[in-house]
Image: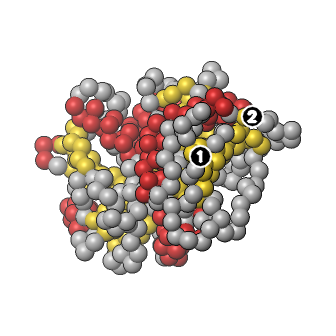
Amino acid sequence: LHDGQIQASLVEVTPSKDPKTPPPPSTLVFGHTFTDHMLSIPWRADSGWGTPKIQPYAPLPLSPSATVFHYAHCLFEGLKAYREPSGKVTLFRPDMNMKRMNTSAERVAMPTFNGDAVIELMKQLIRLDKHWIPEEPGYSLYIRPTMIGTQPALGIAPPKEALLFVICSPVGPYYPQGFKPVALYGTTEYTRASHGGIGAYKLGANYAAGVAAQKAAALQGYVQNLWLHGPQHHITEVGTMNAFVAFKRDNGVTELVTPPLDGIILPGVTRDSVLALARDHAAGVLKIPELTDKLVVSERPVTMIEVKAAAQLGELVEFFGVGTAAVVSPVDRIGYLGEDLHIPTGPDGMGPLSRPLWKYLTGIQTGAIVHPWSVDV
Ligand code: COI
């Protein structure tokens, strides 16, 4: 017996009888195309995790009373698989996603699971569909592990039935024409997260609540929200990404700042990776090519007052978002309380920190730089 845990070795694989032909990579729109197969693992409170199945991608049979439709019992992850020129396929830090998925599940009283088994099962799924990963540079397979409450019951309680499933979507570079800096709207009318709330967890509800705010920002000519928090307008996140700001300090030092994980920030995998690389560079244990600024790396609160003052004094080096989907997203303008702050960007749209950090990180992700974060599939 399996102790209620997920048993990767019990997986039942049903190959598709009607496999599709992957579309030309240049036609891909983020998250609109899905591969031939999916992974699903049911859970019941009385028996734990059931038999994992890899089967053709298909609609889910769910009762209209399933808790996911009523009380937002839904959490998800996003990670990417890369195909190296040699044909080798790798995943980037999947252990981090499994850890966070379990934290999200606990927050909404959903079942936790042994992440290693799901990594093993995702690898099997990816091997089956690996011809869907475009070979062109900058392309990858976006993997979407999801967990929903499936119990058909309207009482508000921990769901007694759940489903963990994983689907895969071939994706191109977020900026196919090169980096395009985005304009942000410093949002004070809406709050993304609050202390004790759910903003530090990757729950579907967080994203649904952000869409109206994004729409309002777009109506004013901005691409994304800069989520500000509290009376001092603390910088929290950029759209669905973590925020980084760089300031010029004395003696030619640049301070790279991101807000701390104090309960209102999503613990991003790209955030953690950028911090680790920048810290190793600052400590002299890693040399990131073309990163010439002398660095200090801080996880500390940062307010719009500080960013605005730095912009006015010419001490703002750059501002960027980081996330799995876009990796790095430079910002060139922030609308704040009726005026626009302008942020410097280089001729290629990036800055003196984001460019070398992006290059190094994507080098690891694509296998050009050998690193333990990249895991063989
Ligand atoms: C990110 O990777 O930056 C995201 O948050 C993904 C988004 C599609 C939800």
Dot label at residue 13: 2
Q: Given the current orientation, which residue lies at the most extreme top position?
A: 86
User: In the image, residue 296 lies at what x, y percent?
Assistant: 21, 42
Tell me the CA gap for discs 1 and 2: 22 Å
Q: Earlier in the sequence, mark 1 or mark 2?
A: 2
User: In the image, residue 267 lies at what x, y percent?
Assistant: 38, 50
Instruction: Sort mark 2 into few (<14), some (14-19) or many (20+) by Cα contacts within 10 Å.
Output: some
Q: Determine the residue positioned at 32% across, 41% down.
A: 275
Q: Quadrant of residue 253?
A: top left
Q: Quadrant of the N terminus?
A: top right
Q: Quadrant of residue 121?
A: top right
Helix, strand or loop for disc 2: strand
47 to the left or right of 337: right
Question: What's the coloring here?
Answer: secondary structure
- The answer to whether any part of residue 25 appears in the image is no
Dot label at residue 196: none
Q: Amino acid at mark 1?
A: Ser
Q: Determine the residue positioned at 23% across, 71% down.
A: 232
Q: Amino acid at mark 2?
A: Val
Instruction: Sort mark 1 into few (<14), some (14-19) or many (20+) by Cα contacts within 10 Å.
Output: few
Dot label at residue 47: 1
Q: Is mark 1 within 8 Å of ligand 1?
A: no
- The answer to whether any part of residue 286 appears in the image is yes
Q: Determine the residue positioned at 51% across, 50% down.
A: 111
Instruction: Please name whichever residue, 353 or 153, is drawn nearer the observer in this view of the structure.
Output: 153
106 to the left or right of 302: right
Helix, strand or loop for disc 1: loop
Q: Quadrant of the C terminus?
A: top right
Q: Is mark 2 within 8 Å of ligand 1?
A: no
